[in-house]
Image: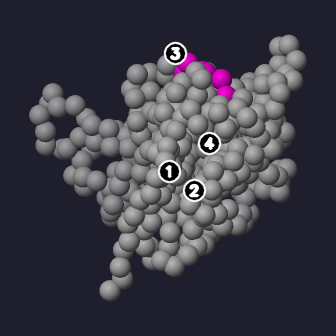
Amino acid sequence: MEQHHNSETRTPLNSVAVQRRSKTKSYRLSYRSGIGAASRLGFTPGLTARRLNTSRKAPKSNNITEKVTKEQLALLVKTEWKLSYVTPLYQFRHTQLKSYSRQLSAFIAAEKQQGLAVDVEGTQNRFRVSFSLVQEMTESVDDAVTVFIQIHSKPLIVRQDEPQRPVWSGWLTCINGNLEYLRSLPKDFICLPLFCSSEAGGLTSVVKSWFQQSFDCCFGPLEISHTSLQWLMALWTNCHPESSIRQLKMIWTLPVEPQLQVTYTVNAEDAWQLWSSVRKENTAAAGEENSIDIEEVTSFMQGLKGHFFRHFRLDLSAGRLDEVSTALGSAKHSGRIKFSNSKYMITTLMLLTECALLKMPI
């Protein structure tokens, strides 16, 4: 019988925790290769050959509470979203959302009637779909307006005054997308490359199928790479003076037998002091925004790894960073994100938009 080991060790300052677990899954990374598909889009500049930007704007507080409804905000900051990329939508119109709501409702009903949507919760329920816009949730004039989708369910036999309950939420967005790519698209295409879904039952796959049939697009899984997770750690830590991160938590997987999972927690002030020590001197000219370079991110990570090695003689460089979290949010390599503070959502979404564009096969 396989034995499962759990142990925890802390540094004298209680700022680091290590947890060992025996797992049977392979630690080996698996990346999806981009394969082109037939589409009306034809040929556009290939983004898959590019890499993440090596420099990006330092995070700044952005009050999106003025741009979204209370219902949307409550969902945005409380839900763990599953990420996907989606290729440009053909003939999608922001002015036709009411029509899309009716079409998707009918599509769900038809799929259930044919027995195709077998995983959808409540086989006897009626579903109502609503499309809405998240106005001004953009960073540039070339960004398409974010589209928010909700699906509500109501049993066929129910009291008249009983409200429908939300069973699925999702949204498509583009925050500060690559200008060269966006401006190269034919006029009939809208680019909303980042798709976030709540993954309730089988509704996500039904919604994706409708979009693919209606707008000649393709969806694919969007993992958050090791480098992107490091960027999020740095960006979130940089926000600490204005909005406390409380702590910086990382989960690593090391390739040993039995497999070792390391939970590494750093006190917020310790993380901020390390980050401050690797930040370059501010050379931004008047009117320009501060930026963060990949060299600073790398130095920050090296400092964290060095601190861990001095205490536990374990080299985290041999492993894989699976998850990072602070009071501002959490992100997982598997492609899940949770926003815990709305002020810095835009900064996070800018990075995720870039990841989605680079992942697209066309």
Q: Give the range drawn in magenta.
A: 59-64
Residue that label 3 marks: 66
Tell me, yes or no, whether the two marked residues, 1 and 4, touch with CB atoms within 8 Å.
no
For marks 2 and 1, the one nearer the N-term is 1
> Which residue in the protein does label 1 denote?
11
Mainly helix, strand or loop, the magenta region? loop
Residue flagged by tag 4: what amino acid is it? Met
| Percent x, y of residue 88 | 68, 46
Alpha-carbon distance for marks 2 and 1?
Answer: 7 Å
Residue 241, image quadrant: top right
The amino acid type, in three-letter code, at marker 2 is His
Q: Mark 4 points at which residue?
A: 233
Query: Upstream in the sequence, badge 2 or badge 4?
Result: 4
The secondary element bearing badge 4 is classed as helix
Q: Distance between the residues labelled 1 and 3?
A: 43 Å
Of the image marks 1 and 3, the number of the one nearer the N terminus: 1
Classify mark 2: residues with Cα within 10 Å, few (<14), some (14-19) or many (20+): few
Q: Nearer the viewer, mark 1 or mark 3?
A: 1
> Residue 181, image x and y in percent?
81, 42
Name the front one of labels 2 and 4.
2
Which of the 4 image quarters holds residue 273? top right
Say left or right for 75 vs 115: right
Q: Real-space Cα distance between discs 1 and 4? A: 21 Å
Q: Residues within 10 Å of mark 1 (few under 14, many from 20)?
A: few
Q: In which quarter of the image is the C terminus?
A: bottom right
Q: Are marks 2 and 1 in contact (CB under 8 Å)?
A: yes
Name the residue tied to disc 2: 311
